[in-house]
Amino acid sequence: MGNTASKNAVIFIGGLKDGPHSTPYIRTVARQLEKAPELNYSMFEIRMRSSFDGFGTASLADDVHDISALVKYLRSIGREKIVLFGHSTGCQDCMEYTNYAKYSNSPVDGFILQAPVSDRESLDVYFPDYQPKIDYADRMIAEGKGDDCLPNDQSFAMLGAPVSANRFHDLFAKGYVDRPPDLPSMQSKLMNLARGADDYFSSDLDDQTVKKFWGRFSKPVLVLHSEKDEFVPPTIDQAALNKKFQEASSFVSPLSGLIPGTGHTVLQEEAREWLAAKVIEFLHTLT
């Protein structure tokens, strides 16, 4: 979207069940970018292995490889600055992308995170009795069946797609715990399961973990929570969480904050215009 001759690029990465053209507000952002020719950005959307219903059998690692391939391509055709713009689970993708030591992926020049919410904590809103389903997925993983999809009655209908035990664990499991000694084999395997790979934004993560995650950023990042996000429990103070992220890394932009009066996907046109203006203000800060 936008001027195809632009020398810079924004790559938009949607959330679970998203794919190209499924998040309407990004068109508002693209239109406003066209009105800021001095920035010289165009907008790209990406179809990844995890797009649409593919999320259930994919992973953040898959997304990083797919995004990196697009970044390499854009560099090859002369794009200079490249910014990743994540919405919802796309924010987790941005966090995972910063792990350059793990993936040797192509570096980018900035990040925008809109609606960075915890899938695990969202269960408190919609499925408060979720733990038996996570336990079931973890037993499958311990039995070597992590790539198998969960039975329908052990998943969540709202996901609307087959979901592997591994992906279910990554989405909804809390941090890992050390294995106590002298446990039976199955219990040992369960206790040694890694943390949920997607668990970047939970409000109960300890300060050391938060600083470790956000300390991976070496380029500016704009963090925008939605003030009335329906996937965030009312007990969570998003303003305080946003401030915590800002304090965790000097690369988190002081322009970060809450998008006023809107929910997860920014449905109101006024809120979309506010978001677009904030994105453009942030892009002006990139040098």
Image (cartoon, helix red, strand yellow):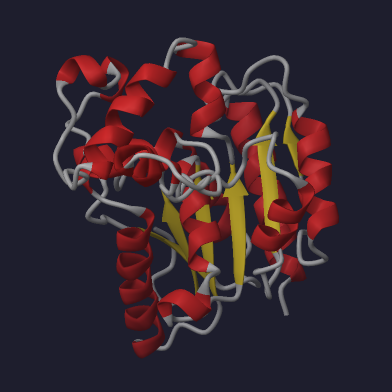
Q: Residue at x 81, y 33 (%)?
A: 239
Q: Where 81 falls versus 191 (above or below)? A: below
- Side (left or right) of 148 relative to 33: left
Comparing 170 with 113, the one in front is 170
- Side (left or right) of 12 relative to 216: left
Query: Where's the C terminus, which quadrant?
Result: bottom right
Q: Position of residue 20 (x, y in %)?
A: 30, 48
Q: Position of residue 64 (x, y in %)?
A: 38, 65
State the image quarter where residue 76 is shown. Answer: bottom left
Comparing 230 with 24, the one in front is 230
Q: Where 240 falls versus 217 (above or below)? A: above
State the image quarter where residue 169 is shown. Answer: top left
Q: Let me know if residue 76 appears in the view.
A: yes
Q: Residue at x 31, y 44 (%)?
A: 185
Q: Where 276 falls versus 161 (above or below)? A: below
Q: Position of residue 88 (x, y in %)?
A: 50, 40
Q: Position of residue 170 (x, y in %)?
A: 40, 43
